[in-house]
Amino acid sequence: MHPSPFQAAARAALADRQLQEALGGLPGGLVARRAAARAALPEFERLRDEARDIRNHTLAHLDLYLEAFQRNAIEVGTKVHWATDAAAARDLVLSLCREADARLVTKGKSMVSEEIGLNAHLEAAGIEVVETDLGEYLIQIRGETPSHIIAPAIHLTQQDVEADFRKHHTHLDPARNLDDAADLVAEARAILREKFLSADVGITGANFLVAETGSAVVVTNEGNGDLTLSLPRVHIVVATIDKVIPTLNDAATLLRVLARSATGQEMSAYTTFVTGPRRAEDPDGPEEFHVVIIDNGRSALLGTPEQEVLRCIRCAACLNHCPVYNAIGGHAYGSIYPGPIGAALTPALNGVAGCRDLPHASTFCGRCEEVCPVRIPLTKIMRHWREADQAAGGAPARQRFALAAWAWLARHPRIYHLAMRLPVAFLGALGRRNGAFRRLPLASGWTRGRNLPAPQGRTFQQLWQQTKRGVPR
């Protein structure tokens, strides 16, 4: 049997030394900073409960808050557009760019624009699109997709960036010094500044849409977001329907858990509330402000067990703490949204048949749920997709047979206990000398990277019965 695309990609990622080097900084970086931020805020767990409740309340009344957002946004001069799917959203944004006679578009980081394939659509129409977030700029010149939700180029090393800059910035002095990270940032800043000043349209995502005021909240750690939304004549926000929240107070609560969960900061460096186009008394800002609100399959999740995945605020804490993501990175998942949130969301948007491996790409250790700022039950949702795949007959015949055999044994406890005692006793005797197996049939996936501890020779049930009778172990 040939490995699936995910299995092949995962194996390639594990063998990629450069990727493993780049991913090695996650535990000591973002994970450690989140832990410190959580420890420094006594009410952090209470805020997580409040954030969960805000998101649940909004999803339960989503239609009302979307209507309120549209009404209040129009009152301040914003033009609101609705798109049912990716194709409609792409065409809407393209028509707005054409109305602006745009030749150059600058973009802030936006996962939904990746989801709908916006860049390629605009470029096919002859419009130059430049990503201005440094990480997004790096993967754009490499022709890649993001490997992380908030750190799209986390799979790259400094040496990769230097090589890419020398390859693509051929108009600069080939003898220039790029040994230091500051030199790389300065070079990117100089190149992007020209684009900021020349752009006809700026496109960003939105972390939240505030129904109370008709505002779009744009959160970044680089000044590129504010330059993208304020310098061009036209600013377009692309956001999905689940981004709406009721009030500014709700935004404050969510922002407190967002930054701490994502990067370990008390607050992101730039948190901008965009409320309509530039007014007569404003020193800067766009002449036109458009918000394109996209469904793309999300409304179908309302009222279903999978609705809870729509609580996500895209902090990526689940990625940072996931042992699977830490081992293989984001590209191996083959989807726009990697890691645990991708394994829960992608089947909901695209159907489980086309991405059946993703819900299985988890150890179910639960670390993702432990750190999610809005307490999404990610393992429960992934388990649902596993069950749906099994019910639809999507699992390989070998796996279906193994599960059916186990289910039969579980319904016949006497046979089950006997069937477990024999191999446990045999393996216990076989492994008594060294206490572990370096190689074992049917366990090569484990023993390839570590030893498999040998069982004691008795099952848990046997030990339990002996304990109840007072028999020494």
Image (spheres, rainbow, N blue to C red):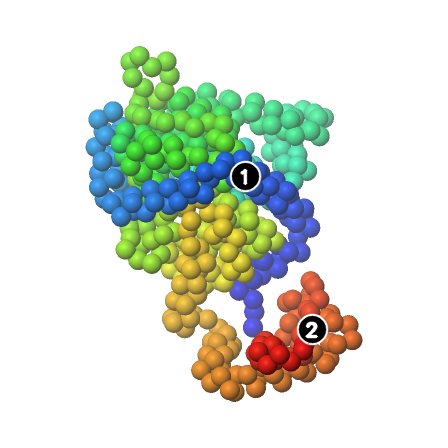
Q: How many marks?
A: 2
Quadrant occupied by the C terminus: bottom right
Q: Residues within 10 Å of mark 2 (few under 14, many from 20)?
A: some
Q: Percent position (x, y) of residue 391?
A: 38, 72
Q: Quadrant of residue 314?
A: top left
Q: Is residue 240 left or right of residue 76?
A: right
Q: Residues within 10 Å of mark 1 (few under 14, many from 20)?
A: few
- The disc labelled 1 sits on which kind of residue? Ala
Q: Which residue is labeled 1 in the image?
A: 39
The answer to whether 18 is drawn above or below residue 395 in the figure is: above
Which mark, by number, is residue 454? Answer: 2
The answer to whether 241 is drawn above or below residue 351 in the figure is: above
Q: Is residue 67 left or right of residue 38?
A: left
Q: Regarding mark 1 in the picture, which secondary structure is present there?
A: helix
Which mark lies nearer to you, 1 or 2?
Answer: 1
Quadrant occupied by the N terminus: bottom right
- The disc labelled 2 sits on which kind of residue? Ala
Q: Is residue 69 left or right of residue 6?
A: left
Of callouts 1 and 2, the N-terminal one: 1
Q: Is 266 in front, or is 152?
A: 266
Q: Residue at x 50, y 74 (%)?
A: 399
Looking at the image, can residue 267 be seen? Answer: yes
Q: Residue at x 65, y 26 (%)?
A: 183
Which mark, by number, is residue 113? Answer: none
Q: Percent position (x, y) of residue 202?
A: 40, 28
Q: Regarding mark 2 in the picture, which secondary structure is present there?
A: loop
